[in-house]
């Protein structure tokens, strides 16, 4: 069945450190892949997406590349800020908008000044 | 653009009661999906509505039902509430491939 596995947190980093949050998925067909972010007390916001193999999604300094051969969509940022502290969710759906999203359990990121 | 709105923000119910949550989609969006997010977990897909019909359903019992109105707004109904139904309920609206989420309704079942 469909599933998303992402590294469990919390992940604690110092400001300006390099960030990687791993995400792997299982799905039928050719899913679209997403990273959502949830700041404290707020709803989910789309951070970036990729809809086909080798696509790179990017936003606010974050990047993730759709790797079909390894079924992965790892999130990276070169230099994190305190304001990046949040919970990050990897997700996919099988396309066409008709399928609900399948989410990972989330990774809590804490950035210390 | 108001984005996706949900009401109420918080709700407290007791076991066995019934609850109705409401969602207004982002302007121009015709599809509404509902998710349940338990504390410390990722959202779980409940169902999706399009053209006033349930188009897809996740692994949730029949106690969870919904409705979509001609203006695309939607309701989620949960009957015979259990303690385990306590969660943040998220609504998301979409037009094409991208879902936009509302702030959620926090349901506590005592």
Image: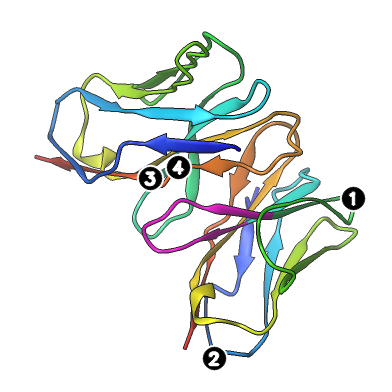
Q: How many residues crowd around disc 2 within 10 Å: few (fewer than 14), some, or many (20 or more)?
A: some
Q: To which chain does the residue with label 3 belong?
A: A
Residue A42 in the figure: left or right of residue B11: left
User: Which residue carries the number 3 mark?
Assistant: A106
B60 relative position to B86: left or right = right
Task: Give the number of the disc on residue A104.
Answer: 4
- Does label 1 or label 2 sit earlier along the sequence? 2
Where A82 falls versus A70 (above or below)? Answer: below
* Residue identified by numbered label 2: B14
Disc 2 element: loop
> The magenta stretch spans which residues?
B35-46
Give the distance between the C-alpha atoms of the residues marked 1 and 2, in whole angstroms: 33 Å
* Disc 4: host chain: A
Q: Kindly report the distance in space between the C-alpha atoms of the residues bearing marks 4 and 2.
A: 30 Å
**Subunit that carries the residue with mark 1:** B
Between disc 1 and disc 3, the foreground one is 3
Determine whether the residue tagged by mark 4 lies in a helix, strand or loop. Answer: loop
Is A91 in the magenta?
no
x, y percent for residue A36: 46, 39
Q: Image quadrant of residue B85?
A: bottom right
Q: What is the distance, in whole Å, between disc 2 and disc 3 at their CAs?
A: 29 Å
Q: Are marks 4 and 2 on the same chain?
A: no
Q: Is mark 4 in CB contact (under 8 Å) with mark 1?
A: no
Quickly name the residue at label 1.
B51
At label 4, counting other C-alpha atoms closer than 10 Å, the crowd grade (few under 14, some 14-19, many 20 or more) is many
């Amino acid at each position: 069945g469909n599933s998303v596995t992402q590294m469990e947190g919390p992940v604690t980093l110092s400001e300006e450190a390099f960030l990687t949050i791993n995400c792997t998925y299982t799905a039928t067909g050719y899913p679209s892949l997403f990273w959502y972010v949830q700041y404290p007390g707020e709803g989910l916001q789309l951070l970036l997406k990729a809809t086909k193999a080798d696509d790179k999604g990017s936003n606010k300094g974050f990047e993730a590349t759709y790797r079909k051969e390894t079924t992965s969509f790892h999130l990276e940022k070169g230099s994190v800020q305190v304001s990046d502290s949040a919970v990050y969710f990897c997700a996919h759906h099988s396309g066409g908008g008709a399928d609900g999203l399948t989410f990972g359990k989330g990774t809590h990121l804490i950035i210390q000044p | 653009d108001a984005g996706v709105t949900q009401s109420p923000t918080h709700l407290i119910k007791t076991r066995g009661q019934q609850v109705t949550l409401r969602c207004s989609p982002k302007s121009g969006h015709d599809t509404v999906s509902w998710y349940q997010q338990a504390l410390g977990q990722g959202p779980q897909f409940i169902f999706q509505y399009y053209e006033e019909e349930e188009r897809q359903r996740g692994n949730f019992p029949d106690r969870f039902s919904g409705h979509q109105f001609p203006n695309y707004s939607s309701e989620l109904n949960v009957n015979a509430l259990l303690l385990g139904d306590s969660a943040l309920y998220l609504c998301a609206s979409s037009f094409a491939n991208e879902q936009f989420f509302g702030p959620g309704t926090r349901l506590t079942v005592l």
